[in-house]
Amino acid sequence: GVPAWVEGELRRYLECGILAHGFARARCSECAHDFLVAFSCKGRGVCPSCNARRMVEVAAHMVENVFPRLPVRQWVLSFPKRLRYFLERDAKLAGRVLRVFLRVVEATLRAASPDAPADARFGGVTFVQRFGSALNHHLHFHCCLIDGVFAADGDGMRFFEATGLDERRVATVQEAVRGQVLDLFEKEGLLDDEATANM
């Protein structure tokens, strides 16, 4: 069988938008026209309509209220199947792995930002995705990060854009994260030397 949360999502999706499963009546106070609005399942995994609406709402909120008008880049951290098993079951380990990734990306953005001081910091938002396109377990992170770093400048902040971010630097991030994550798994006793060397 499938996990209970998958079955629950699917059953709610089958009722999404069908008037027989609940609706609200909307009425125009000026012309007295009324119509029915079917309830949505508000699902987070199966329903394409609810997922699309939520995605648009969050994206609009990020653009209008969270991110300054600066360049933003999406970084995605995905894992081989051998590591996913541990990450899905251990939230603290997943958090530690994410911190490794963000630390490496921040250092890279700082190095790629001309004139940025050593204490400059980055900003962004991470979205945790726990499943793949086939509803399989697949924990991965989508990080929307401002493409540069910030440093104190008098009473305000100064932005240093990462103009030196090229394929070579991105490959360096990938290599550094791979090494540090595998080291972490080995220190935690989740992988042995041979498995780490093979990966």
Image (cartoon, rainbow, N blue to C red):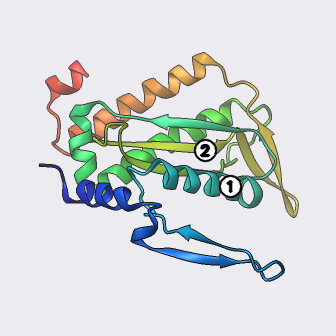
Dividing the picture into quarters, in which one does residue 108 lie?
A: top right
Q: Which residue is mark 1?
A: 62
Tell me the quadrant of the picture where the C terminus can be found: top left
The outermost residue toward the left is 1
Residue at 46% of width from left, 63% of height from top? 42
Marks 1 and 2, the one that precedes in the sequence = 1
Residue 130, position as x, y percentages in the image? 36, 48
**Of all residues shown, which one is farthest toward the right?**
154
As drawn, the residue found furthest toward the bottom would be 29
Is 120 positioned to the left or the right of 77 in the image?
A: right
- Total numbered circles: 2
Q: Residue at x 35, y 56 (%)?
A: 14
Foreground residue, 111 or 16? 16
Secondary element at tag 1: helix
The residue under label 2 is: 144
For the point 34% across and 50% down, which residue is it? 94
Q: Position of residue 65 (x, y in %)?
A: 74, 61
Would residue 35 appear left or right of 81 to someone viewing this image? right
Tell me if 13 is positioned left or right of 75 in this view: left
Q: Nearer the viewer, residue 80 or 164?
A: 80
How packed mark 1 is, by other alpha carbons closer than 10 Å (few <14, some 14-19, many 20 or more), is some
Q: Inspect the image, locate mark 2, and give the three-letter code of the amino acid beneath it.
A: Cys
**Image coords of residue 44 (percent x, y):** 42, 56
Q: Are marks 1 and 2 in contact (CB under 8 Å)?
A: yes
Give the image location of residue 175, x and y in percent. 43, 24
Q: Is residue 128 above or below residue 133?
A: below
